[in-house]
Every structure is written in structure tokens, then in C-alpha cells.
Amino acid sequence: MAKWKKSILYWLVLSPLLLVILFPYAVMLSTALKARSEIFVFDPTWWPTELMWSNFIDMWHAVGFGQALINSLVVSGASVVLVLLVAIPAGYATARYQFWGQPAYRQFLLITQMLSPIVLIIGIFRMMAALGVVDQPIALILAYGAFNMAFATWMLQSFFETIPRELEESAWIDGATWFQSLRLIFLPMALPALAVTAILTFVNTWNEFVLALSLLRSQDSYTLTLKIYSLVGAAYKINWDHVMAATLLATVPVAIIFAWMQRYLVKGLSLGGVK
């Protein structure tokens, strides 16, 4: 079968799934571009009579979207850096060195993922209050780092085990230190796993709501999830054009990261494969 025929066949098979995935975004875009008087009319229309691109500008200024976007980027980006800084050496040590209780330790990493942040929210709040960081980005960064670190360590050690030990030993024979072999040999080969771990951590922190609601107080410190929630849950009147515009824009950073790192994501999803 010709290559173009296979491509057409694949697109036909995947088109129902593609429609299901894109449908919510089509609804968001359609609502965001409608005039407020058109949103609840009967019979409803899919396409607005006039494209109201000004809804995005009005929403940006009315709800302080820019500050919330910066807060989310800072918190999510710093959380990813914190998680990787701890999970890389922890995953490397778990994969390369044998120690007593190692199987139980790996199971413990998985068991910790069964705990929801809401179960520990009182203890986390009291801890952050004792540190004096409530209503500050550092509170979320520390909390997100703690909750994502176990999964990141477990994921990285699974991939690190597939990298031949002989490559590092060859570098040691050539005079490289442990840190040099880790930086120049080990980490470049583990780049797909690092990308997957970073993406999953970023998405988890970007979409998190419970911890942000508990640890943040002022509007200036709100992340995007709280800012969008305030448009719906803390208002007497819901402007759905603003809600949909904000929700649509909130998905853009995640979509950009996925598009930018998709080649590493595909490689990393085949963890455990022999190269």
C-alpha cells in the first residue's frame, strides 16, 4: 500500500477521536468570540454573527489575566526545576546502587501517588503558615515539588536502568569524574525521560487547584486556575465570554510545550525499550 493511502487510512481511523478531543476547544472558541447577548439565545448558533475578538482584550484587563499567567508560569516552571534537581540524583542512585530495602522503597514511591493533596491539606497549610510563606509563590512551589517528586524519581529510575553501565565506566577510564560522566554521557541519553517527566510535572502543577485555593489569599498571587474559578464561583453574574476566553488562553502554554517537546515525549513514552 502506498504511503499516502496509509496516511489517509490512519486519518480516517483517528478522525472520530480527533473530533472528540477538539470539540471542547471548538465550544470554547465559539463562545469566546460571541457577543454576550448571543450566548444564551434560542435557537443557539455555533458561529457568532460577529467575531468579538475584543472579548479577549476585555477579559485580559478586567480579570487581571496577565498577572495570573505570570504567577502560573513562575510556580509551574520553578516546581519542574525543583523536582528535576532532586529526582535526577535520586533516580540515578536508585537505578545504579543496591541498598537494603530497595524494592520496598520503589513500592513506597508508587504508594505515595495514591495520596491526594486534599488529605494532607491541613498539615500542609500549618507547615506553610509556620514557615511564613502563605500567600506566596514559594508555598506552592514547595508543595508541588513534594507531591511530584516521588513519581518523577520512580519514572526516571525506570529509564536510567536501561542505559548501559559500560558507557559510564568507559568515561571513568578516560579520566572523567562521576559528575562529568553524569552530565556529558548519562543525562544526554536520558533526555527523552527528562522531557516526559518535566512535561507531566508541568501539567500537574499548571492544572492544580486544591493547594492553590488553600495557600493563596490575595488576587495578585492567584494562579490561572484560581483566577478562572473566581470568574465562575465567586461572582453574582457569570460572563461566559470572559470565562471561555480565559480558559482557552490558559491552555495555550501547555499546548506550546507539548508541540515543542513532542519528539522527546514520543521517545520517553517508550521507557524500558532497548536502544
Image (cartoon, helix red, strand yellow):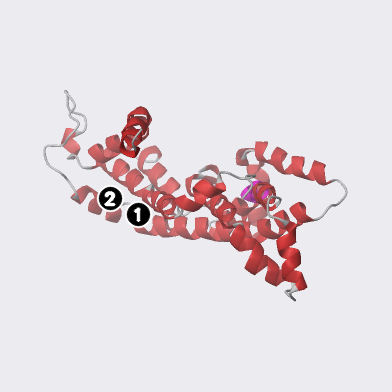
Q: Which residue is mark 2?
A: 59
Q: Residue at x 12, y 41 (%)?
A: 50
**Residue 237 visible in rendering:** no
> Which of the image's four quarters has the N terminus?
top left
**Identity of the residue furthest to the left in this view:** 49
Please tell me how crowded label 2 is: few (under 14), some (14-19), or many (20+) other residues with Cα within 10 Å. Answer: many
Decide: is 39 above or below 245. Answer: above
What residue range appears in magenta?
147-152
Q: Secondary structure at mark 1?
A: helix
- Relative placement, left or right, of 26 versus 256 is left
The three-letter amino acid code for the residue at tag 2 is Met
The three-letter amino acid code for the residue at tag 1 is Phe
- Relative placement, left or right, of 138 versus 232 is right
CB under 8 Å between discs 2 and 1: yes
Front-most of 129 and 151?
A: 151
Q: Residue at x 66, y 62 (%)?
A: 186
Decide: is 75 above or below 204. Answer: below
Front-most of 239 and 156?
A: 156
**Identity of the residue furthest to the top in this view:** 43
Q: Secondary structure at mark 2?
A: helix
- Relative placement, left or right, of 134 versus 263 is right
Q: Which residue is mark 1?
A: 65
Task: Verify whether residue 150 appears in magenta.
Answer: yes
Q: Residue 256, which numbered label?
A: none
Q: Position of residue 185 (x, y in %)?
A: 65, 65
**Corner quadrant of residue 169:** bottom right
**Identity of the residue furthest to the bottom in this view:** 175
Q: Position of residue 111 (x, y in %)?
A: 71, 38
Q: Position of residue 176 (x, y in %)?
A: 72, 74
